[in-house]
Image: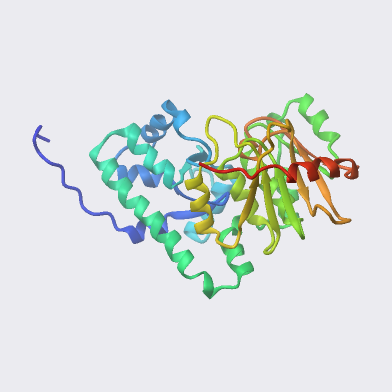
Amino acid sequence: MAENEIAVYEPIDKEKIKAKIFDIRAYKVIMDSDIAVYFDVETKALNRAMKRNIKRFPDNFCFQLTREEYREILRCQSGTLELEQGKYSKYLPFVYTEQGVAMLTSVLHTDRAIEASIQIMEAFVEMSHYIRQNKQLLPYDELKALELKHYQLSDKVQNIEDNMITRAELSDLMKLFDSGIKSEEILILNGEPFKADEAFQKIYKKAKKNIIMVDDYLGVKALRHLVQAKAGVDITIISDNKGYSPLRLSEYTDFQTEYPGMPIKFIMTQNKVHDRFIILDYGTKSMKIYLCGSSSKDSGNKITVIVGLEKTDIYKDMINDLLKNSALTLR
């Protein structure tokens, strides 16, 4: 193309884009190979650009699918899954959220990428807008089930997945460590963000009256875990919202727009808490408290254990004092 020539590209059919957007881990995402086609680059080149700028792509922008997630997506796309060797890529693909698609344009710097990203993001927005407009057409519980159907795994399926870990995936030391985990303890291994997401969501599902999360480091991922809470459960987050990328008011506003039935009360820890806790049904006889080895927004990045505490009464005064702290203001 000549230096002063203006590139003109055919418009992308946004309805076709929408067909390639799917829900996984409580995010709407699009596959790296589909973005590459729209951006007119090779998939490897697209992901190389992402990896060279990895700090710009946190988990809520981009993540790699597990084998099980990829197989499920293939089932949804084709109706049946071709299991024979060579029928699907041996490399697990990356998927990008709306924010991830936008960030890709800043690292690829091509006119085609910029133009295509705008149309892809418009498709994301239109899909979210359609869901919000039609919420009244479905009962609340059915809507949540549809939006998050990939998390509705039966115990039988989960047991199968748990037993699929091979010796090559764990050292002997980790096997010994894992063997001592009790039923009220959850081990999350390094590089298992999907298992981490599911662990937190399973805990929040148990709440009947209220949820109190004590964690000084917040993010959108932490909010999306709470989506699994039952309707009518009161949610309080106690946090000083620290870190290099704290939860922003705009992110919380977007979350409220997407999930209007989930108001959250924010209270400061006032630098009084080091550990992370999840308290379910505070003030009732069935109160449960979990001690978390990492912030939920970072879970799956490193080895983490979530422990259910047996003696909950000794924590009542601590919780009561924290609830009296000043309100946290997001910025």
Q: Is residue 191 above or below residue 29?
A: above
Residue 209 in sight: yes
Where is residue 40? Give x, y as percent. 28, 41
Is residue 233 or residue 169 the one in the foreground? 233
Residue at the spot 55% in from the left edge and 36% down from the top edge: 246
- Figure quadrant of residue 141: bottom right
- Please identify the quadrant where the N terminus is shown: top left
Q: Which is more toward the observer, 236 or 7?
A: 236
In-image side of 292 versus 28 (left or right): right
In this picture, residue 52 sits left or right of residue 9? right
Colouring used for the render:
rainbow
At x 90%, y 45%, the residue is: 313
Image spot of residue 145 (x, y percent): 61, 63
Task: State the count of labels.
Answer: 0
Relative to residue 79, is residue 282 depicted above or below?
above
| In this rendering, position of residue 70 left or right of residue 161 | left
Residue 184: % across, % down? 83, 44
Which image quadrant is residue 325 in?
top right
Residue 206: x %, y % from top left: 76, 56
